[in-house]
Image (cartoon, rainbow, N blue to C red):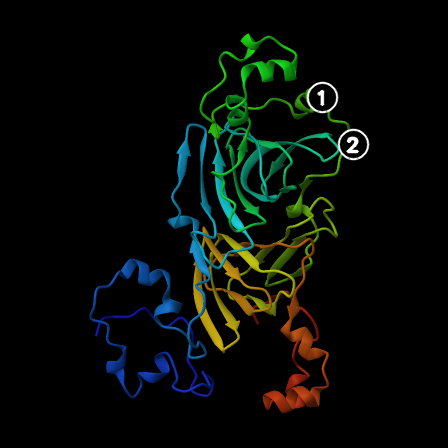
Amino acid sequence: MTDQPTPPHHETPAVGNPDLPQEGLVNIADDPAANTMTGPQNPSLAAQFPSQLNAPATDISTQAFFWSSFNISPRRVQRGGWARELTQSDFAISDEIAGVNMYLEPGGIRELHWHQTAEWALMTRGGCRVTTLSREGLPSVEDVFEGDLWFFPAGLPHSLQGLGPDGAEFVLAFDSGEQSESNTLLLTDWFAHTPPDVLAKNFGVAQEAFTDLPLHDLWIFPGEVPGELERDQLAAGVEWGGTEPVIFRMGKTAPRFENSGGSIRIADSTNFPGAKTVAAALTVVEPGSMRELHWHPNADEWQYYLKGQGRMTVFNTGPHANTMDFRAGDVGVVKRNLGHYVENTGDEPLVYVETFRSDRYEEVSLANWLAHLPPSLVSQHLNIPEEVLATFPRGSQGIVPLR
């Protein structure tokens, strides 16, 4: 029998899968031969997913695979930067959100373009100059930094450019799982596919002005590092207060939940009016702590893990319950209304983004629900004495601190 990774959960005989036959390591005490694995192995891959190889006794059956990763997504590299994406064609369960991880070198430009879907983004490193136009035709030119986000409604044109000295890295979320970063409406493409006499008539200049147009799209390309923000705002005709905000400094907002176990900051239409179709949470879970047992009633949760490592069990009808491990660069999806938690299994803070195709962030806390029921009713369900139930949390915690 080959050596197996250490089981990620502490198994207790008194608690486990109530459905028979049982699954998991609870079976091998009396029948160790049942755990034999003599076929081809990939130890490096197995080490990444200990909860898949040796699931907790409470896991049962299988459900749609809810793990993927930008770490296995092909990078499209150009002069000026790179991008990698996860769409529904790569990640079947993710039908509400498609994600892109992009880097622009200092001065690197994501070509002027627009999408058929809305774009939400979180800056994860460096700085970026962002331009766009409102539905009323009013311009916006802003600089965003780590912890900041932007939101562009579908159809509104925009550009992105890396600032010095580190350029810009960010994650994009589109409000359709089918949206690809390689399927955008690009400025150079439109010019190249419009008759020169039409361009001349539209802009009121001679056709010769368009002699040197690029015949291939630029997508990402190198450029000069942007200068002073105020200069670009003046040149673009930005008037303060003249357009709805497209930038939100989420990293500087007060947390919705905060305790010794971590924090959750929210961005949705209640505090960021520009966010019409996407809501988000920036979550930090300290070592040994966990995101409490909960679910989201209004949208699927699309997760992007930025730092640390964690473990999540998703509870589905059936019943189905499966546990998966996550690390930096990974992506998870939890369908709406499915119960789950996220536990920090490492020795550094676990940081991840929760994104939802909705204008409002909503969640239901299991602890909060039980706290607002007659104790005798809960006791009859769970066979837990009422005096013990009285020690349960009396409301939503967001993060469960290490006790």
Q: Residue at x 47, y 19 (%)?
A: 214
29 or 324, nearer to the observer: 324
The residues tagged by marks 2 and 1 sit, at their Cα atoms, a distance apart of: 13 Å
Residue 19 percent coordinates (x, y): 45, 85
343 or 93, nearer to the observer: 93
Which residue does the numbered mark 2 point to in the structure image?
A: 242
Q: Is residue 370 left or right of residue 182?
A: right
Q: Residues within 10 Å of mark 1 (few under 14, many from 20)?
A: few
198 or 84, nearer to the observer: 198
Which residue does the numbered mark 1 point to in the structure image?
A: 234
Q: Is residue 82 above or below residue 36?
A: above
Residue 339 percent coordinates (x, y): 56, 70
Q: Residues within 10 Å of mark 2 (few under 14, many from 20)?
A: few
- From the image, state whether disc 2 or disc 1 is nearer to you: 2
Q: Is residue 283 left or right of residue 240?
A: left
Q: Residue at x 57, y 59 (%)?
A: 301
Q: Residue at x 72, y 39 (%)?
A: 245
Q: Residue at x 64, y 91 (%)?
A: 380
